[in-house]
Image (tube, grey):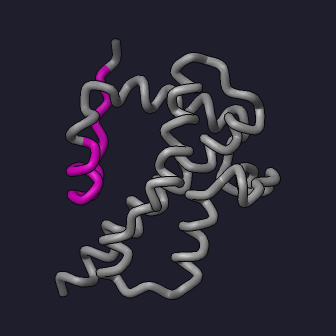
Amino acid sequence: MVEITIQVPDALAKHLEPVQERLPDLLAQLIADAQLGSTLGEILSQPVSVESAPAYVEILDFLASGPEPEEIINFRVSPEAQERVSQLLEKNRESVLTQSENAELDLYVEIDQLMTLLKVRSRMHSSR
């Protein structure tokens, strides 16, 4: 195996530390996704209904309300929305996701990454 050294911002390094052992696998998945053309724009262009994507709708509504940094830091989706995500994750573990469920789960992964970045930025702004 080849060893590669990169420089990353301190905030990113803190987020990478817990998954340090999985980084090669995560990078491989990221590259595979990029080669498949899976981007947030493409995922967002797929139809997502209110009934099948409660967490997505909740997050969009929350962000559209213009929340303060502290509200972003404390934001959590409802138990119902979390249950939907849990169902999708379980089906994913069992390899029984439909194509639309897979797209929905991909959307949640992208949105989760976005929310993580927003929370980091909000913490930076609230600590000033």
68 or 128, which lies in front? 68
The residue under the point 58% across, 26% down is 91
Q: Quadrant of the N terminus?
A: top left
Q: Residue furthest front?
A: 80
Task: Say above or below: 123 vs 42.
Answer: below
Q: Quadrant of the C terminus?
A: bottom left
Q: Residue furthest top?
A: 1
The residue under the point 29% across, 81% down is 70
Magenta residues, start to end: 3-16
Residue 26 appears at what percent x and percent y? Answer: 43, 31
Residue 25 appears at what percent x and percent y? Answer: 42, 24
32 or 8, which lies in front? 32
Residue 22 appears at what percent x and percent y? Answer: 33, 26
The number of callouts visible is: 0
The residue under the point 51% across, 27% down is 90
Residue 75 is left or right of residue 48, and the answer is left
Residue 23 appears at what percent x and percent y? Answer: 34, 30
Residue 55 is left or right of residue 15, and the answer is right
Task: Say above or below: 33 vs 16.
Answer: above
Q: Residue furthest left?
A: 127
107 or 22, which lies in front? 107
41 or 112, which lies in front? 112
Q: Quadrant of residue 12?
A: bottom left
Task: Say above or below: 44 vs 99.
Answer: below
Q: Quadrant of residue 27?
A: top left
Q: Does the magenta segment cover residue 69?
A: no
Q: Quadrant of residue 54?
A: bottom right
